[in-house]
Amino acid sequence: MDVSPHHDADVACEVFRNLQDQHQWTSLEIHAIPGLPRPMIRGLPPRLLYLHPDDQIAALAYEKSTGTRAQHDAEFEWVLAVHLAEKWTLSNFAAVMDAVPEARKGAKRIVLAALHNDSTVVYYIVQEGMVKPRQN
C-alpha cells in the first residue's frame, strides 16, 4: 500500500460524494481512525445493507406467522475507500478490522469501496471471520 496520504484523502472524498449523490446515504463523515494510515467514511445507507443469516431465518418465521414483513432499520456502516490499483493483503484488512470500532452485535464488517480511474465505484461487504450460511 505505497500510496500518499493525499491520494487516500482524494479517494475517500470521491467515494463520499458517490455515497451521498448516487446512493442517498446520510450522516456521512470522514474519520481519521487511530491505527490506520488512511481515513474511513461512516454513514447511514437508505436501507439495511446486510442481514445476518440467523436474522434472515427469524424474519422469514415472523413473516410466515404474521403475514407481514419484518422491519429492519438501516445501520451505520464503516466504508473503506480504496483505489482499484492498490494492492491489499489479508493483514491489511485485518488491521482495518482491528481499528474499526465495534458498532454491532457479532462480527465486525466494513463496506469496501473500490474506486476506478473513470470514477466508477464498486461496493463489497467484507466481514471479519466466518459467516454461517443460511439454511434453506
Image: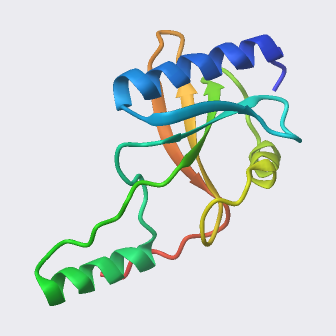
Query: Above or below — where is 61 with respect to 76?
Result: below
Q: Position of residue 91 (x, y in %)?
A: 82, 48
Looking at this view, name the residue that lies furthest to the bottom.
65
Q: Residue at x 37, y 59 (%)?
A: 73
Q: Is residue 54 left or right of residue 30?
A: left
Which residue does the image show at 25% across and 79% down from the upper left?
A: 60
* 94 displayed left or right of 47: right
Residue occupying image coordinates x 84% and y 20%: 2
Q: Is residue 48 above or below residue 21?
A: below
Q: Position of residue 42 (x, y in %)?
A: 60, 39
Q: Where the N terminus falls, by quadrant?
A: top right
Residue sitting at the far front: 27
> Where residue 132 appears, x then y in whole percent?
52, 76
- The quadrant holding residue 82 is top right
> Which residue is most to the left?
67
**Front residue (pair 34, 133):** 34
Hey, which quadrant is residue 87 in on the image? top right
- Considering only vertical position in the picture, is 106 above or below 14? below
Q: Is residue 135 above or below residue 9?
A: below
Q: Position of residue 109 (x, y in %)?
A: 61, 55
Of residues 93 and 62, the one drawn nearer to the viewer in this rendering: 62
- Of 20 and 128, nearer the camera is 20
Between 59 and 117, the residue placed more toward the observer is 59
| In this picture, residue 69 sits left or right of residue 85 | left
Using the rendered view, name the quadrant where residue 56 is placed: bottom left
> Which residue is located at x 36 percent, y 31 percent?
23
